[in-house]
Image (cartoon, coloured by chain):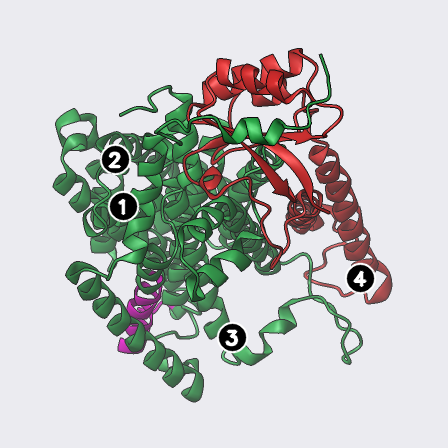
Amino acid sequence: MIRFEPRADRSLRLQPRPPIVGNPALGRITDDVARPLDARPGLGWCACFAAAATALSIGVACVAYEIATGIGVWGLNRTVGWAFDITNFVFWVGIGHAGTLISAILLLFRQRWRTSINRSAEAMTIFAVVCAALFPLIHMGRPWLAFWVFPYPNSRGSLWVNFRSPLLWDVFAINTYMTISLVFWYIGMIPDFATLRDRASAGLRKTIYSIASLGWNGSHRTWSRYETLNVILAGLATPLVISVHSIVSMDFATSILPGWHTTIFPPYFVAGAVYSGFGMVTTLLILTRSLMHLEAYITHRNLDAMAKVMLLTGSMVGLAYGTEFYVAWISGNMYEQATFIGRATGPYAWCFWTMVACNALAPQVLWSKRIRASVPALFVFSILVNVGMWLERFVIIVTSLHRSYLPSSWVMYRPTLIEVGTLVGSFGLFFSCFLLFIRLLPMIAMWEVKGAASHAGGTHG
Amino acid sequence: MASAYLIATFAEPRALVDAVAAIRARGFKIYDVYAPCPVHGLDEAMGIRRSRLPYVTLVAGVLACAATVAFEFYVAVFDWALNIGGKPDNSTLAFVPIAFEMTVLGAGLATAAAFLLRAGLFPGSAPKLAGPPVTDDTFAVALRWRPNAFDTGEARNLLIENGATDIRQMVGDL
C-alpha cells in the first residue's frame, strides 16, 4: 500500500477546490461573539459605564478618607466592632459563588445550558472576590501592612500567624479561591484568544491576543489534555467553593455569641451564597444580553434554569431561618431565644422582615412558569435577591452583636455616609470591571458553544 | 525543522472522526487533528491514551497537604508555642481548613502548570497553525508526508471519500 510517488504535490495542486471550506454555523458563533469586541461601544454601555465609574470614584474617595483619617470615620463602636465592612465582605464572597457553581459544579453534572453563561459568571466570581477582599483590607486601618497575615519568616521572632483562627482560615480560603478561579478563567479563555488572534489583522490587538493565547493551535492532542485539565480544575473548585463559604461562616460560628454560635451556619451560608450569586448573575446577564445583543446565546432557557436554582436555594435559606428559630426555642437557652426574638421584634426588625420577604417568600413566585419566562419580572426579582441577601448578613452580624449577654453594653449601630459610600464604591468597582470585561474579552466561551453545537448535531442552521 | 504535511480539512466533526478512523484502519499514522473545539469520539479514533494529568494533581495535592500540616505543626508546637485561649499547642482539627485550602491550591496550580508545559504553551510562542480557520470553523487532519514512504494518492482518496472538503500539502512546522 505504501509506494513511491514523487509527483504527489503536483497531482494534489490540480484538484478542484470545493466551494465551501469550514462550517458556517461555527463561523457564525465566532462572528457573533467577536464582533462586539471590534465595534464601538453603544450608548447603553457608555451610560452604564459612566454610572459605574462614578460609583467607583465615590468609593475611592471614601476609602482614601478612611485610610487617611482612621476607621473612626465608620459608625463602629466598642460593642459593634465590625458591621458594614464584614457584611459587605460576606455579601461579595457569596456573590462569587454562583460563578464557580456554574463553571465547575454544572460542568461536572454535564449541564449544557451553562456553556453560554459560564465565562461571564466566572468573571463575576473574580470581580466579586476582589470587592470582598477590599473590606478586610481597609478595616485593617493600615492596609500597607496587610502582608502580615501571611506566615513568612520575620524579624519579630519569627512571630507566626495563629493557625487556629478562623480569620486566618479566611485569608487562605479567599486567596486560594481567587487564584484557582483566575487560573480556571484564564485557562478557559486560551482557545478563544487563539480564535481572536487568527481573526485580528496585524496590530496591537493581534500582539496582545498572540501573547495571551500562548501559541494555541487547536491540536486535538492538546484539546484532549485540556478537557482533562478542565474536569480536574472543576473537581478541585467544587469542594473549594463549599469550603470558602463554610470558612466564612466559621468567622461567626466559632464564637460564643448567641445567634452566631450554631452548627447550621456552614450549609446555611453556602445555600445563601448560591442564592445571592444567582441573583447577581441574573441581574448581570439580563443587562448584558440586551446591551451586547446576545439574546440568541443567553436564552430564556438559561434564565429559566437560573430561576429554578434560585427557587431551590431561596427555599433552603427560608428553611434555615425557620430552623434557627426552632433550635433557639428548643435549646431552652434564654440568650439564644432573646437574640432571635430581638431579631424579629427589636430595633432592626424592619431589616429582618425585609430579608424574610426577599429571601424566603419572594422566590416562591418562581413556581410559576409565566414568571420564570418573563425577563422584566426576573430582573426585578434578582434585585430583590441582592437586597435580601445583603440584609441577611447585616441582620446576622449586627443584631447578634448589638445586644448580647451584657445589657449595659447594648448599643445601636448606624452606618456613616463614609461606610455607605464605600459600599456604593464596591458596586462601582464590580460593575466597572464587568462592563470592561464584556467589551474587552470574549464574554461567551466560543469553543464551548461550538462544542455543544457540533455535538448536538445541529451544525447547520 | 520544516517537514511536509498533508492537510485535509473538514466542515463536520462527525465526518472528521469517521475519516480519522478510516485512515488509521488503513495503516496511516495521524500526525495530529486541529479543531476549533474538542471533538467527541476523536480520542478513541486517534487512539490517544488517557492523560496522566490526574497523577500530577494527586502527587501535588498530597505534597501540598503534607507540607502545610508539617509547617503548621512546626510553627504551633516547636518554633513558638503560644497559649491561645488555653487551646492545645497541637490543635490538629484547627489546622485542617488551611491544609485543605493549600492542598487545592497546590494541586490546581501544579496541574495547570503541567498542562501548559506538556502542551508547549508559553507566552510569546508562535502558533504552528495548520491554517487559520482551524481556530474558527474548520477541522483539519494532518498526516506527516514522507516522499518515499507514503501513498499520497491512497491517502487523498480515503480523505475525499470520507468527506474532506479540501486537501493540500504544507511544508512547514506543526
Instruction: Assess whether mark 3 and mark 1 are in contact (beta carbons under 8 angstroms).
Output: no
Q: Nearer the viewer, residue A76 or A296?
A: A296
| Colour of the chain lettered B | red
> Mark 4 or mark 2: which is in front?
2
Secondary structure predominantly adopted by residues drawn in magenta = helix
Quadrant (top left, top right, bottom left, bottom right) of the N terminus of chain A: top right
Residue at image x 74%, y 39%? B56
Q: Say whether marks 1 and 4 touch (CB < 8 Å).
A: no
In 3D space, how far apart are the residues under numbered discs 1 and 3 (Cα atoms)?
A: 34 Å
Question: Where, by quadrant of the figure, is residue B82 drawn?
Answer: bottom right
> Which one is closest to the eye, mark 3 or mark 2?
2
Return the disc, 1 or 3, that comes first in the chain's sequence.
Answer: 3
Would you say the residues marked 4 and 2 are in contact, meaning their CB atoms lie under 8 Å apart?
no
Write down the residue under mark 1: A285
In the image, the segment drawn in magenta is: A410-430
Helix, strand or loop for disc 3: loop
